[in-house]
Image (cartoon, rainbow, N blue to C red):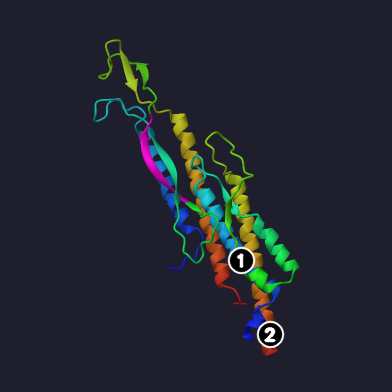
Amino acid sequence: MIDFIPGISGTAAALNAERIRMEVVSQNIANASTTRGPNGLPYQRQQVVFETVLQQRLSGSGSAGVSPQSVKVARVLPDTRPARTTFIPGHPDADANGMVKMPNVNIHEEMADLITSSRTYEANLAVIKNARQMALQTLAISKH
Amino acid sequence: MIEALFAQTNYVASKKLLDATVLRHEAIAANIANAETPNYKRVDLAPTFAAELSRAIADKSVSQVANLRPQLAVDGSATAANRDGNTVQLESELLRMQQNTMAHALEVQFISGSLSKLRSAITGRLT
């Protein structure tokens, strides 16, 4: 398949990675006060780890220089920060002193992550838009 | 014989520039894709390309221009803005992308212009 639109595969991978990140953020926000998960423990914040992927290039177009790199979500890791404890006596998950272990999710942090993620997503969409425009212009050479 | 029509230095050089622009777009696409990857170092067109191209054009050597190979290189001058070691800055990357797209439009226009001049020389008609 001829690569009509330059750099499209790396951008597609980036859109995918950012979407996974947004899903993880939404999962964190949804579980911001889940005090008991399937394992009986409070929910632990999850975070994504991005990693570069070397892209395969066609032997003809590739020269000795550096190859452009793609991106992927390598792992989704739990955040190891300790759980917050809040005083809620009478809560079914409260200990003898009335303290409840709450998830280590900070809503403000998650919102900042969400905005960064969606801005990066938009930037990648802009890349596709420009690449498409360039490809169409190239195809229109000598049409007029 | 017909090759001579397409062997003007300017025409060959603008074709090379078009290749370089597309390669640069790939570099910018990779940079924006990795805008959030820790320790990623931004890549760009190797700075030697522009120097070699202008030298080849100054020498008016078509073969020298045709043999140029635009390459990507890690941008050593970029510094990381924060502690994750990533040297990509989204805003300047987007700005470079717009400049690059404009440059591409200009080069396409130049190539189209060369071809249409050639056509009107052959047919004797102004299209």
- Name the N-terminal-most of marks 2 and 1: 1
In the displayed structure, A137 sits above or below A48; it is: below
Q: Measured from the top left, where is residue B54 in percent x and y?
A: 72, 63
Determine which of the numbered discs, if any, sits on residue B120 in the image. 2
Q: Amino acid at mark 1?
A: Leu
Mark 2 Cα shell of 10 Å, populated few (<14), some (14-19), many (≥20): few
- Toward the top, the furthest residue is A97
Asked if residue A103 is positioned above or below residue B63 in the image, the reply reads above
Q: Nearer the viewer, residue B57 or B86?
A: B57
For image coordinates 47% across by 36% down, the residue present is A113
Q: Which mark is residue B18?
A: 1
Magenta residues span A70-79
Q: Position of residue A53 (x, y in %)?
A: 44, 50
Q: Residues within 10 Å of mark 1 (few under 14, many from 20)?
A: many
Label 1: state its secondary structure. helix
The reply to whether residue A76 is in sight is yes
Determine whether B21 is above or below A97 in the image. below
Q: Disc 2 on helix, strand or loop?
A: helix
